[in-house]
Image (cartoon, rainbow, N blue to C red):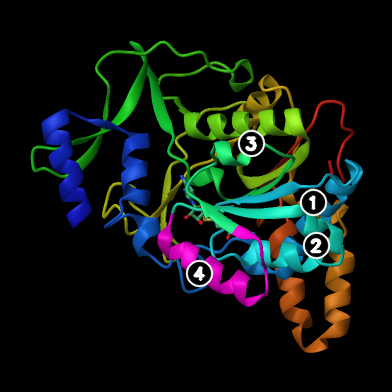
Amino acid sequence: MNALSERIARLIRFSGPISIAQYMAMALHDPACGYYATQDVIGAGGDFTTAPEISQMFGELLGAWMVRAWRAQNCPSPSRLVELGPGRGTLLADVLRTARQDTNFLAAHEIVLVEASARLRERQAALLEGAGAVNIRWCDSFDEGLCDRPLFLLANEFFDALPMRQFAYNERGWCERMVGTSDSGALRLALSPSPVPLRIPEHRGTPQPGSVYEVCPGGEAVVQQIASVIAQHGGAALIVDYGYGAEPGFGDTLQAVAQHRFADVLENPGEADLSAHVDFAALAKAAVDSGAVAFGPVAQGTLLMALGIEKRAERLMREAPANAADVAAALDRLVSGEQMGKLFKALAILPPGASAPAGF
Ligand code: SAH
């Protein structure tokens, strides 16, 4: 048991079992021992590799998408460019390099990075300020200060890291899956003794005994806020993550990953990344309920192909033939169905009346 699991076990002894969401929040964000506070998380030397870390093409195409969305709304100014969970800052650096081709876009935007980890903020500042980006600020969460002007927002692998709750179906109904302790004091999963009333989206189908339903109230709340700013002031959000589309099904998707391998979810909290499938249908519904329109989700491979990733790859190969094999491998990783192309999906949120954006 590490120091954080001992602390969690003590909390449980005094207050009773905690929800999976509370457990995730402590494991990821505890200021002393949490994963994002202590680990070097992203990239080949970290625990997992994300699309912008695979290739610059990802950020360049998303950057061009944003500039296009801004132009399609008659270039609003002043406007705000926000990224949720920017990691090492690579995606935003690639977006800004592409956006620089339209100097009006940069001049119109205040840039805000929503980042909970002090450690990652430092990395982001070093990369972006080194690349000459100005007019940047940081905040801890999507707050009131981001609600007064048009909003152009990006989020890649942010929603999968948000704490979610799990409910298991049994003869009593839906009982919440909780984290408790065994007699020896180790953390273990347990079910809440009494069932809770739940309304399950119809497209999920009929639950069987043992079915697990996951819900991410924090993710839905952020999307509601984003969508109401976009509905009111204009803008566009592009959310990319791994997860469910509108297909039916139930499942326990909570996973722990350390050094590019799966780990036990309850062992050594704070030392592995915890994430879960994103329910895109639920996010789209949250956006529509808040007065915006949602497009997608479309598969990441489909979106990147529609945005011209093959052409971009050919050009990079021509410019630097020595890197051709790396570019081809990155292209395959981003778009092929066996790799990130299908499991990863993109959702776009636009103001009411907007027509479908590029790639959707
Ligand atoms: N978008 C990046 C990093 C993804 S990892 C990339 O594609 O490489 C998740 C990121 O979200 C990290 O930067 C993490 O610190 C941040 N994060 C996770 N939960 C958060 C929360 N609740 N509030 C703010 N930032 C959070």
Question: Horizontally, is 41 left or right of 220 in the view?
Answer: left
Disc 1 to disc 2: CB gap under 8 Å: yes
Q: 338 and 95: which one is in front?
A: 95
Per the rendered image, the range of residues in magenta is 117-136
In terms of sequence position, does the residue under pointer 1 or pointer 2 come before the other? 1
The residue labelled by disc 1 is 66
Which three-letter amino acid code belongs to the residue tagged 1?
Answer: Met
Image point (59%, 61%), residue name = 50
Which three-letter amino acid code belongs to the residue tagged 2?
Answer: Ala
Disc 1 to disc 4: CB gap under 8 Å: no
State yes or no: residue 96 in magenta: no
In terms of sequence position, does the residue under pointer 1 or pointer 4 come before the other? 1
The residue labelled by disc 4 is 123
Picture quadrant of residue 314: bottom right
Task: Estimate the spatial distance between the alpha carbons at disc 4 and disc 3, rounded to whole Å.
Answer: 26 Å
Kindly identify which numbered label has been placed on residue 159: none
Give the quadrant of the N terminus.
bottom left
The residue labelled by disc 3 is 147
The residue labelled by disc 2 is 99
